[in-house]
Amino acid sequence: MRRLRTQVAIVGAGPSGLLLSHLLALRGIDSIVLEQRSRDYVEQRVRAGLLEQGTVDLLREAGLADRLDREGLVHEGFELRFDGSQHRLPFTELTGWTTCMYGQQEMVKDLIRAREAAGGQVHFSVDDVAPRDVATTCPRVRCTIAGDAVEIAADFIAGCDGFHGVCRQTIPAGAVTTYEHVYPFAWLGILAAVPPSTVELLYAVHERGFALHSMRSPAISRLYLQVAPAEPLADWPDHRIWAELRTRFALDGEEALNEGPILSRSVTEMRSFAMEPMQYGRLFLAGDAAHIVPPSAAKGLNLAAADVRVLAAALTVWYAEGRPDLLEGYSRVCLAAMWQGQEFSAVMTSLLHRFPDEDRYAVKLRQARLRDLVTSRAAATAFAEQYVGLARTRLTGAAGAALSARPAQR
Ligand code: FAD
Ligand code: PHB
């Protein structure tokens, strides 16, 4: 068995694991990242696209935003369609904050390149990852790298291995409380090689179900349709997808939508999950490993980045000053932000979707809420503060400030 040692063993090379490794390296803290998939796979995996300004600022401060600043599409509002009418929610005018459209896989590529350039250790195609002794001060991770059995001794283990990862499973059931909610619908998402038909994101509430027009670049559109849970993709040939999108986005019977080749398609279930606390002994969970939200409000990746920011700050203070207080407060700070994100994701999900068991009364209440949002500046501002992530800074401000402390000297 080959034996390695590092300060923080990180499981998962998604946005959480890679960003954590990078932020720690900036502060002179050593880490090894272990990823079960190939590099190609993680760089091509199509997922999130909306980055809040706070997430962009974090990437910029960490020197990771060169390409993002060149290629990211900065947005200042979105369009909402319901009852045959269109409305604009000018979130930047209301909050001063913008959002940025930039594909998660592009962010992952940038992160991998940055780790590579800095000589960071990121291992792909790693099998049999198994955290051990996490309740002791000498946690270890066993795994198989390029066919060799390896044991990595660390001070801490960061579980950044997503919702289906192994780290959460190693925590004894009685040590945590979990919360789960599954919605009775899913999203069929496509990536299409066609210029977006809209400059800003377009959220359409329709009696046939919700539709979202998003984008990844001036040449690539990202579109979603509300469908039944576990909807077979085989039932959705290209022409049916485009026809349904046209119908749900139509205004005054006019159906204007650029169509093009579909590059990828998938069905995503709509689920919320949370675990409290997000720590067990020397194992700290971050991002989707600890919590997921339905994609309606685009919070998942942004919450993951917020966790990592707090964890990096807490580890920095632990290594630099030997103080455990920020690590001890990790769960408390992250959970407050996470529950805020859960609540807003649930609000946006119920505002935008047609529920299968919804009666006529519930439909009318939803329409009243939508009307309020586009006619009351107070309602729109409260919504916009959540949408752009400004509301979260009130919860994580203090912990975030600690991150700005001087990097530790080695
Ligand atoms: P992941 O991205 O899941 O990364 C975990 C990594 O761990 C993976 O690479 C995985 O292969 C690896 N791993 C798993 N198990 C093991 C193991 N046993 N050993 C080693 N490695 C392992 N969020 C937003 O903020 N904005 C959006 O616009 C948005 N849109 C979305 C749209 C869709 C359709 C979906 C599905 C999600 C969307 N999200 C969005 C959510 C966002 O994609 C996730 O929250 C984000 O990927 C979380 O990052 P993560 O690094 O925590 O987890
Ligand atoms: C996306 O582009 O994937 C996206 C954008 C906004 C959302 C959800 C998903 O609210």
Image (cartoon, grey):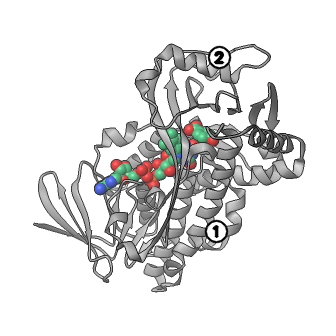
Q: Secondary structure at mark 2?
A: loop
* Ligand 2 contact, mark 2 (Cβ < 8 Å): no
Residue that label 1 marks: 396
Which is more toward the observer, 355 or 239? 355
Residue at 57% from the left image edge and 31% from the top image edge: 224
Question: Does 310 sit above or below residue 209?
Answer: below
Q: Tag 1: residue type? A: Thr
As measured in the structure, the alpha-carbon distance from the residue carrying label 1 to the one carrying label 2 is 40 Å
Mark 2 closeness class: few <14, some 14–19, many ≥20 residues within 10 Å: some
Which is more toward the observer, 114 or 384? 384
Task: Assign the N terminus to one quadrant of the image.
Answer: bottom left
Residue at 76% from the left image edge and 49% from the top image edge: 384
Q: Is residue 349 left or right of residue 19?
A: right
Which is more toward the observer, 161 or 155? 161
Mark 1 closeness class: few <14, some 14–19, many ≥20 residues within 10 Å: many
Residue at 24% from the left image edge and 48% from the top image edge: 125
- Which numbered dot is residue 257? 2
Sequence-first tag of 1 and 2: 2
- What percent of the width, then of the height, locates residue 325? 52, 84
Q: Quadrant of residue 338?
A: bottom right
- What percent of the width, then of the height, locates residue 75? 70, 38
Q: Tag 2: residue type? A: Leu
Q: Secondary structure at mark 1?
A: helix
